[in-house]
Image: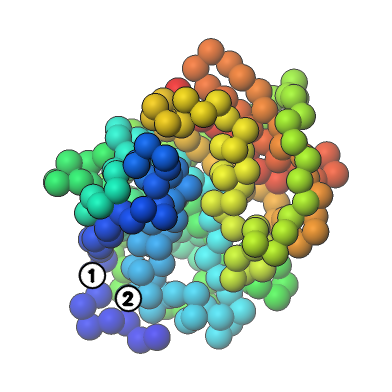
Amino acid sequence: MPIAPNFTSVLSKDWEINFTQCMPNGYLKYTDLCNILQLTAAAHSDMGGISFSDMQQFNQAWVLSRMRVEITALPKWRDIVTVKTWINTLENSRSVRALEMYVNGEKIVGSETFWAVFNTQRRRPEGLALPYEHFELYPELKATEESFSKININSEKEDVFEKSVYLSDLDIVNHVNNVKYLEWCLDHLEVDLILKQKIKSFEMNFLKELSLNDKVIIHENYSEDSILFSITKDTKNCYALQLIL
């Protein structure tokens, strides 16, 4: 797609929270929060001519490598949320994107995301084949108090659950969708921690691809104010999630 006539380097987009996105308490699911953030990032890429469709001309796609989300409050059913996004850095095969969510003008969520250009045939990172110089970059404009990090996966961890990857877990890039990892882990979390919005922030590291029929193990490790989940395949780490309570 060509660059949209109304393209701007900072995008604000409104979304209405519908009932399919909500938990039993009427508040937005953490997984759907991540979906809304990703959909806003995708909309900005569409406008700027670096969308999935554009990149597939060169067998490329953006894939999420790291993500940090800081939460003051979750929106609820029928809220209109405004998500604002811009790019901090974009160079060669890597990009850092900032996102913020507002309700009635009040910021309730901030997120910093790290993306890599991925060749969907060769299954490896490579430089972006499309022009992107029209994007103004804002390296100093941060959406979070802390940046994403490399999560330290503790070797002393408990096996929680074994799982096979199903077709419903895959996305358009033909690997497990990033939100699915989060969903698998949160399904094993104490219910009140979710329903009472005890999660102040979380970070995710995506380390290795998972594909159809892969068999994985979900692990957990508790500390006083945080919970670490990791997912392994054949003893190799594929994913890490750090929840701060």
Local secondary structure at mark 2: helix
- Which residue is farthest right? 234
Q: Position of residue 35 (x, y in %)?
A: 44, 55
Report whether 124 appears left or right of 214: left
Which amino acid lies under the numbered mark 2 shown in the image of this protein? Met
**One can see residue 88 in this view:** no
Residue drawn at the location 47% of the way across and 81% of the way down: 54
Dot 2 corresponds to which residue?
47
User: Label 2: how many residues lie within 10 Å, few (<14), some (14-19) or many (20+)?
Assistant: some
* Element at label 1: loop
Q: Amino acid at mark 1?
A: Thr
Q: Quadrant of residue 49?
A: bottom left
Q: Is residue 186 above or below residue 193?
A: below
Tell me if 45 is positioned left or right of 64 in this view.
Answer: left
Q: Earlier in the sequence, mark 2 or mark 1?
A: 1
Query: In which quadrant of the rendered view does residue 13 lie?
Result: bottom left
Q: Residue at x 14, y 46 (%)?
A: 105
The residue carrying pointer 1 sits among few (fewer than 14), some (14 to 19) or many (20 or more) residues within 10 Å by Cα, namely some
Q: Position of residue 28 (x, y in %)?
A: 37, 45
- Please say if 243 is above or below 48: above
Residue 62: give its label.
Answer: none
The answer to whether 26 is drawn above or below residue 157 in the figure is below
* Image position, residue 70 (x, y; %): 37, 36
Q: Which quadrant does the N terminus fall into?
A: bottom left
Closer to us: 13 or 142: 13
Image marks 2 and 1: residues in contact by CB distance under 8 Å: yes
The one nearer the camera, 218 or 141, is: 218
As drawn, the residue found furthest toward the front would be 24
Q: x, y (%) of residue 219?
A: 71, 32
Question: Of residues 3 and 132, which is closer to you in this image?
Answer: 3
Residue at mark 1: 8
